[in-house]
Structures are given as structure tokens and as C-alpha cells.
Image (cartoon, helix red, strand yellow):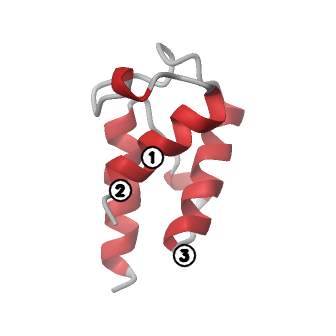
Amino acid sequence: MDTFEVLKKIIADKFEKPIDIITLNSTLETLEIDSLDTFDIIFEAEEKFGINVPNEEVAITTVGDVVALIDRIRAKNK
């Protein structure tokens, strides 16, 4: 399961954004996603990937940051 593709779908569905505007370099700010929305994305990703993201790890500004964080945690859990 590709992390970026899953996150794009989560963001597109949850925030009604066109999937083609979501890139690894997209900032959460330009996508109009605030800090509470970021936690919603992380929570949904935790459920999809069966992981737990510690709150202190959530220092992210781009979609690529979220992908890297989730991939790092998934790699630890293998």
C-alpha cells in the first residue's frame, strides 16, 4: 500500500480537494488544512496502516512530511 496514494485519497475525500493538486510538496497551509485537520489525517492514516503516531512526532508542514513520518513509523513496526 503506497503511503502517498493513501494520503492523497484521505485528503481529497475528507477536505473535498481535487486529487491532482495534492503533491508531496503541497503545504498543508495551501491546502487549507489546519492543525486539527492534520490530526484527523494522522488518525485516519493510523487506522489504515495499523500504526500509532506519537503526538510529539507531528511537526509537519507538507504532505511529503506526513508521508515520511508514516513511512518511518511503518518501517519501525516491521
Q: Residue 56: percent from the left, percent from the top?
A: 56, 53
Q: Callout 3, which amino acid?
A: Gly
Query: What residue would you read off at disc 1?
Result: 7
Query: What residue would you read off at disc 2?
Result: 3
Label 3 CA crowd tier, 10 Å (few <14, some 14–19, many 20+)? few
Q: Callout 1, which amino acid?
A: Leu
Q: Which residue is located at x 33 percent, y 62 percent?
A: 71
Q: Which residue is located at x 40 percent, y 22 percent?
A: 27
> Disc 1 on helix, strand or loop?
helix
Residue 70 appears in which quarter of the rendering? bottom left
Q: Is residue 48 above or below residue 22?
A: below
Give the spatial CA distance, label 1 vs label 2. Answer: 6 Å
| Screen quadrant of the N terminus | bottom left
Q: In the rendering, which numbered label is found on residue 58?
A: none
Give the spatial CA distance, label 2 vs label 3. Answer: 12 Å
Left or right, 15 with reference to 62: right
Q: Is residue 53 visible?
A: no
Q: Residue 74: percent from the left, percent from the top?
A: 37, 72
